[in-house]
Image (tube, rainbow, N blue to C red):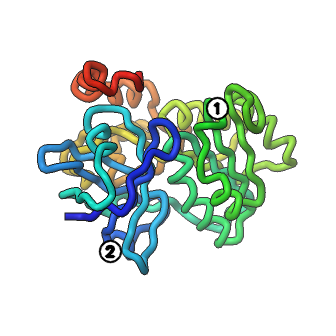
Amino acid sequence: MYRIIERRMIVPNLHEFIVEAPAVAESVKPGNFVIVRPDDAGERIPLSVADWDASAGTVTSIFMQVGGSTAKLARLKPGAAVPTFAGPLGKETEIGAFGTVLCVGGCYGIGSIYPIARALKEAGNTVITLLEARSSYLLYWEDKLAAVSDKLIIVTRDGTKGAKGHIDRIPELLQRAGAVPDRVIVNGCTFQLMRTAEITKPLGWKTIVNMNPIMIDGTGMCGVCRLSVAGKMKFACVDGPDFDGHEIDWDEFLARRKTYNPEEVDPLRRSSCRSHF
Ligand code: FES
């Protein structure tokens, strides 16, 4: 069993989840993920790692409550334990001396882009971090991200903080900052990943997206996480989760992503948690 150190809603519907898992904390790298089960009967939930403390033996994730399984996770209290906390899984995000890197984070990806931005900064890159949210009350970890970024850009759809608009403003905001990225790395919801890749493709900005398919085993055995990249079948859990966003078959990915909505989201709609929909 893995003890929960913290589980709290940091902004509506997003939870910070800190678990005691010394073996994971010792070997985890930016871009890795873990698989968690809330209880013995629970689904296996893949969570991107957002931070860790090797000396304390703890691992931090940010998760969004989207279905029945994450609703179970969201009900767990500090001091409780989860039966499964497997990881680190997946390939780590490539960290190199690229020059200028634009790190884009939205939703739970504001958390998971943090260790990536930190590692890129330590590797000597100029790091520009762009956070996108519907409104200012959905932003978090701004101070942490500012501390590892040369510039922090905020975009909110309602204009309550930073620039008003959405991810489509990236080229204009980068131009205003006088920067042309050598690489773009995106963590967040599928729409953010896809839209950023669409925007950067005509500009020729290499764009790495951290994919978030449904997963079961997380070790390349079940095939649930498969996607098409440059016309080839890949498994996000072992070949990714990072891929070149310009090579992904997004239509196929979106269709597969919805497969389990009847099992996951519909029961929640009928439950007491229906206020989230
Ligand atoms: Fe089963 Fe990737 S989660 S193959």
Amino acid at dot 1: Ser
Q: Nearer the viewer, residue 193 or 84?
A: 84
| Place of residue 126 in the rendered image (x, y in percent of width and height, measured from the top left) | 75, 62
Mark 1, other Cα within 10 Å: few <14 / some 14–19 / many ≥20? some
Residue at point 45% right, 62% down? 92
In front: label 2 or label 1: 1
Residue 22 falls in image quadrant = bottom left
The residue carrying mark 2 is: 22
Please state which of residues 167 and 269 is positioned toward the viewer in this rendering.
269
SS at circle 2: helix
Residue that label 1 marks: 135
**What x and y, as percent, mark residue 148?**
68, 64
> Neighbour class for label 2 at 10 Å: few (<14), some, many (≥20)?
some
- Is 272 placed left or right of 10 in the picture? left
Q: Residue at x 40, y 77 (%)?
A: 56
Q: N-terminal of the two: label 2 or label 1?
A: 2
Q: On the rendered structure, is 114 left or right of 163?
A: left
Q: Nearer the viewer, residue 32 or 8?
A: 8
Q: Do labels 2 and 1 touch, CB within 8 Å?
A: no
**Residue 216, disc:** none
